[in-house]
């Protein structure tokens, strides 16, 4: 263990020279498309930056607050969504004003400072001023108290951190691979379900199980679009009554595939212009986020951005239909016309081919789907918990490092 009493503690600004960059006037075309890499804060997601999306000219450097930082400079994002992100320059480069450069110092290991700032990121964010987009000033950064062991100890600490982080990174990589495998498995379960493979053994590839048929969706359910195109402030007479009126957000936030809450109500006038769909109706979004689905847990109306699908009794099970659309979502998006804002319509939905199993078998298929997806969900929860623990372990290592307890 190091003798921490021999460590110095100084403000970062007394140990390192720091300065931020600048943005040359966008109105002057001669400042851009040059040869000097120009780093924006959104690019601080790599360990070392060798190239940039934009490059500026020598003229831009001369006539703006942008400046060229030497290779090896440590960069930190000062504000916005990327606040606190870090990277090193692998080449000489300039930055915009949202990025602060911390120059190399012979008495300090730059990776030691990098790890210290990574450890202090949340503290810096808390000190950030502003509303929705917090920012940390160079003043805050320069006042940050930096524990400074001898350079030899800094080097040893960096080596130990990198060794331990390498093990953590390998574990995280394995966990993310497992996550991707679970995603693939879920897709496979749904694919197998509507091929009949979950409930029929020894089924040949491409063969339809006995008793199954493929039909147009309009043959097995009622399909109609919602009515209202108006927001409450534009048509107040339609709203504020006794009839639940669900919106796309209610579908997106549905609990367990069922819409159990609603954010608006319709009046008698609104109902006269619309339709009260019964409990059990499958709702599907047809604009913006196409193909999001959920089942009504109460009678309700909905707007023209939603289509209602009411399966025929004894022929189509609504949960079977819901899982079909979950499996079909990507294909549904591909059916949308190539316009600025993609959307689908009732005509497209009516002509979708759906494999229909016997009604009792549909219930068995849903049970199989939910059983298998439940296992996958539990595994996903375990993986997420392990990922949180990995990040907590990373912070624990850094805390020990800067308390002098790591080497």
Image (cartoon, helix red, strand yellow):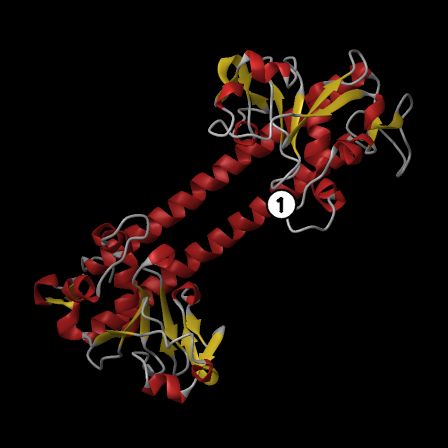
In the image, 347: left or right of 82? right
The answer to whether residue 394 is above or below residue 206 is: below
For the question of whether residue 260 can be seen, the reply is no
For the question of whether residue 326 can be seen, the reply is yes
Tell me where residue 377 sits by quadrant: top right
* Residue 214 rendering spot, x and y as whole percentages: 88, 29
Disc 1: CA contacts within 10 A as few (<14), some (14-19) or many (>=20): few
The answer to whether residue 321 is above or below residue 26 is: above
Tell me where residue 387 sits by quadrant: top left
* Residue 136 rendering spot, x and y as whole percentages: 24, 59
Count of marks placed on residues? 1
| Quarter placement of the N terminus | bottom left
Q: Which residue is denoted by mark 1 in the rendering?
A: 181
Q: Residue at x 44, y 42 (%)?
A: 386
Q: Residue at x 75, y 18 (%)?
A: 311
In the image, 176: left or right of 149? right
Which one is nearer the viewer's eye here, 337 or 385?
Answer: 337
Which one is nearer the viewer's eye here, 136 or 31?
Answer: 31
Which one is nearer the viewer's eye here, 132 or 196?
Answer: 132
| Quarter placement of the C terminus | bottom left
The answer to whether residue 110 is above or below residue 326 is: below
Tell me where residue 165 sits by quadrant: bottom left
* Residue 283 rendering spot, x and y as whole percentages: 65, 25
* Residue 295 rendering spot, x and y as whole percentages: 63, 21
Q: Residue at x 46, y 29 (%)?
A: 233
Secondary structure beneath dot 1 equals helix
Which one is nearer the viewer's eye here, 131 or 237?
Answer: 237
């Amino acid at each position: 263990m190091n003798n921490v009493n021999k460590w110095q503690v100084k403000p970062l600004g007394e140990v390192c020279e720091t300065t931020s960059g600048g943005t040359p006037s966008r109105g002057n075309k001669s400042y851009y498309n040059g040869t000097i890499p120009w780093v924006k804060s959104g690019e601080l997601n790599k360990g070392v930056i060798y190239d940039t999306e934009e490059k500026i000219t020598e003229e831009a450097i001369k006539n703006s607050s942008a400046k060229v930082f030497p290779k090896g400079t440590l960069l930190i994002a000062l504000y916005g969504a990327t606040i606190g992100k870090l990277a090193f320059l692998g080449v000489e480069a300039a930055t915009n004003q949202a990025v602060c450069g911390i120059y190399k110092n012979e008495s300090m290991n730059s990776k030691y400072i990098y790890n210290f700032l990574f450890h202090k990121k949340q503290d810096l964010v808390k000190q950030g001023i502003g509303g929705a987009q917090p920012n940390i000033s160079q003043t805050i950064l320069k006042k940050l108290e930096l524990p400074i062991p001898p350079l030899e100890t800094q080097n040893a600490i960096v080596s130990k951190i990198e060794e331990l982080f390498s093990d953590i990174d390998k574990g995280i990589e394995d966990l993310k691979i497992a996550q991707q495998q679970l995603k693939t498995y879920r897709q496979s379960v749904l694919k197998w379900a509507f091929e009949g493979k979950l409930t029929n053994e020894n089924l040949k590839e491409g063969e339809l199980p006995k008793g199954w048929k493929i039909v147009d969706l309009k043959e097995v359910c009622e399909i109609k679009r919602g009515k209202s195109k108006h927001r409450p402030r534009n048509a107040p007479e339609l709203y504020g009554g006794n009839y639940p009126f669900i919106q796309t957000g209610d579908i997106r936030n549905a609990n367990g595939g069922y819409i159990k809450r609603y954010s608006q109500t319709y009046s008698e006038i609104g109902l006269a212009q619309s339709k009260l769909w019964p409990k059990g109706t499958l709702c599907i979004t047809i604009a913006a986020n196409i193909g999001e689905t959920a089942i009504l847990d109460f009678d309700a109306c909905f707007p023209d951005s939603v289509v209602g699908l009411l399966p025929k009794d004894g022929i189509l099970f609504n949960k079977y239909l819901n899982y079909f659309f979950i499996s079909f979502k990507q294909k549904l998006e591909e059916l949308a016309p190539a316009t600025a804002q993609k959307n689908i319509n009732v005509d497209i939905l009516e002509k979708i081919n759906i494999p229909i199993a016997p009604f009792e078998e549909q219930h068995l298929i849903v049970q199989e789907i939910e059983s298998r997806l439940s296992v996958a969900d539990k595994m996903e929860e375990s993986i997420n918990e392990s990922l949180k623990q990995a990040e907590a372990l990373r912070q624990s290592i850094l805390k020990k490092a800067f308390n002098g307890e790591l080497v």
